[in-house]
Image (cartoon, helix red, strand yellow):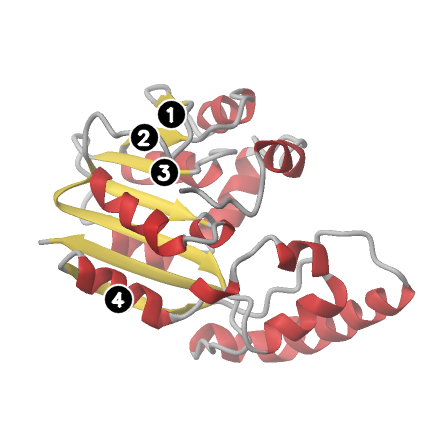
Amino acid sequence: MADKLTTQKYWETYYEHSHANKQHIKTVCSYYNPIWDMFIKNQSDAKSLIEIGGFPGRYLAYLANRYKLKPTCLDYNSDLTQIEGSFKVMDVPDYHIIQEDFTTYKPQITYDYVMSNGFIEHFENYDAILDLHVDYMADQGRLMVMIPNMRGYVKFYKYLVDYKNLKVHNLKCMKLEVFKNFATRHNLAILHLDYYGGFPLGVHQKSNLMQKLIYKGHRLIFKYFANERLEKCPSKYFSSAIIGVFEKQ
């Protein structure tokens, strides 16, 4: 069923350097505070949160700390030290780790909040993978899905300077219509669905001289001029992500 575009080894190598740094976690995760505040209804200590594909745990640890949630990380990565380290530096002593493959694992309980960040786009059968998320949602539970946007002009940029990374992403799922259809299939209320953020300048491979020049030119344009506009008016051609927040009826 899975039709994965990546492997376990790919992710263990991708995150081989530790991300368990408190200031780094806060810097990365606080960028999405407007979304988190929409996603989390209140700060009750009784609320549970699971992240699908949660390695290395920084978003999960950040939310658990910020909203006093009880976090669970589901990921098949064999290295637990980074996840445990993220919880430790964010002062989250009470957590659960499920070391399983999401595509075959059957949830034992449901959760008040379900989060999936940069996950479904690594599968050919993204609709089926997205559908599995609903099994984790409690009644009136919420689901937040965030994926990168690599269509539009972003695809052209990635093709020039970040091709290897582009090829392990399924661009077919990077449309709002995919998530509208998902909500319809499962009778979920759409609380938020839109593009988010500035232009994704990041490069995940070694660059030659021409690629470095292309990167620097785009960095100059977007970081110092265009991104301020994109933060206010997200674009399907230039913004870095698609974010959907859904509620079970």
Q: Which residue is mark 4?
A: 181
Real-space Cα distance between discs 3 and 4? Answer: 22 Å
- The correct choice, above or below, for 29 with respect to 136 in the image is below
> What residue is rendered at 83% in x and 58% in y?
207
Q: Is residue 123 visible?
A: yes
Q: Nearer the viewer, residue 249 or 44?
A: 249
Asked if labels 2 and 1 touch by Cβ distance under 8 angstroms, the answer is yes
Residue, disc 1: 92
Tell me which residue sits at (36%, 38%) in the image. Answer: 51
From the viewer's perspective, is residue 84 above or below residue 200?
above
| Residue contact at pointers 2 and 3, CB within 8 angstroms | yes
Marks 2 and 3 sit apart, C-alpha to C-alpha, by 8 Å
Q: Are marks 1 and 4 in contact (CB under 8 Å)?
A: no
Could you say which quadrant of the image residue 191 lies in? bottom left
* Amino acid found under the numbered disc labelled 3: Glu
Mark 3 and mark 4 in contact? Answer it, CB < 8 Å: no
Give, as a three-letter code, the residue at label 1. Answer: Val
Q: CA distance from mark 2 to mark 4?
A: 29 Å
Q: Amino acid at mark 2?
A: Pro
